Amino acid sequence: MDNKNKIKTTEKKKKSNFKNLDKKKIILTIITIILFIIVLILCYLLLYKYVLKRNLENSALDFSDKNQETIFEINNVTFFSSCDAKNKSASSSNFTLENLYQYTDMAFFITSPKEEKNLENTLKSVYIDNINFTKLPTLGTPSLYYKNIYNFAKSDIIDSNLINNRLDFNISSEDETSLDTPTLYNNLANPIVLSYANNNIKTDYTITNTNSPLTYDGSLLKKCDILLNWIRSSISFDIYITNNLDQEFKCTVFIDIPLESEEESIYDGSVTLTNNTNFVFYRYK
């Protein structure tokens, strides 16, 4: 019996050892698989980081190669700011304004450092997009319009010229063409002219002080007790150009609507100024 018991005990120990050995193998296998997966993930992350870095470097080099020299730029913008209003009623003792609005006409002169015109620095297509009022006035509703350059500094706002989102320009190579619709000469001869208008600053507002003449310009703001801080606004938009080599350029323009200068204020009637700018078109394609 003792021998049998010994044999049974020995067999049990062997089985137990086999079971322990199997568990160790399983655990080692699982650990190995986990380590392998971790190594694969690390290798993937390192490779992804390397590829991303190379792509960024290549993109930067490609951008740099495309922009070794400036082809198009805007070096100055001319502004004219004033106000106007529509009369609802008038009498000898008072005026009632239906819509007091402030407007700023802007002329953007696209130029090229190269004076001689060629396929590279002439226009094939131009459009404006991504219009954003980066600072809204406290009073009124701002909008942006296309404007014929021959109406620059005039208070007329043509509803059909409202820019809802994108504005595409006709490109002309003729000596003379109508500018009633958005049109640019392909040789950069005329500027982009836009009109910012802030409508309904005051509606149904009665001016009872008629001792001094009522002038329909920026002085209306003072007569209607409008602080300039209430109508300050800023705007941004992108201008896209394709030249006659089918190269594509983009410039983002940021404008603070001018209501005063060192010499004058819109309260005096109007503000006219030319700001030097450094808006450069970057080639992206």
Image (cartoon, grey):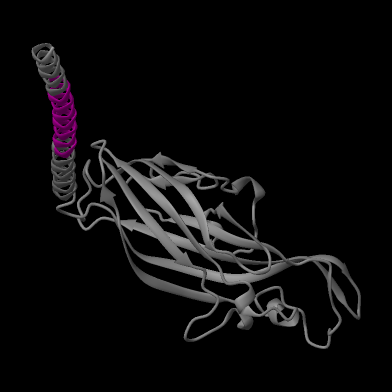
Look at 38% across and 55% down and name the residue there: 252
Among the 4 quarters of the image, the one containing residue 11: top left
Look at 38% across and 45% down and name the residue there: 175
Among the 4 quarters of the image, the one containing residue 92: bottom right
In this picture, residue 225 sits left or right of residue 150 = right
In this picture, residue 161 sits left or right of residue 63 = right
* Residue closest to the eye, 67 or 9: 9
Percent across and percent down for residue 115 are 21, 56
Look at 15% across and 50% down and name the residue there: 64
Percent across and percent down for residue 80 are 53, 69
**Magenta span includes 32:** yes
Asked whether residue 13 is in view, the answer is yes
Asked whether residue 149 is in view, the answer is no
* Residue closest to the eye, 207 or 2: 2
In this picture, residue 141 sits left or right of residue 261 = right
**Magenta segment, prevailing SS (helix, strand or loop):** helix
Percent across and percent down for residue 180 are 55, 47
Give the magenta-colored segment's residue range: 18-42
**Magenta span includes 166:** no
Q: Is residue 88 above or below residue 191?
A: below
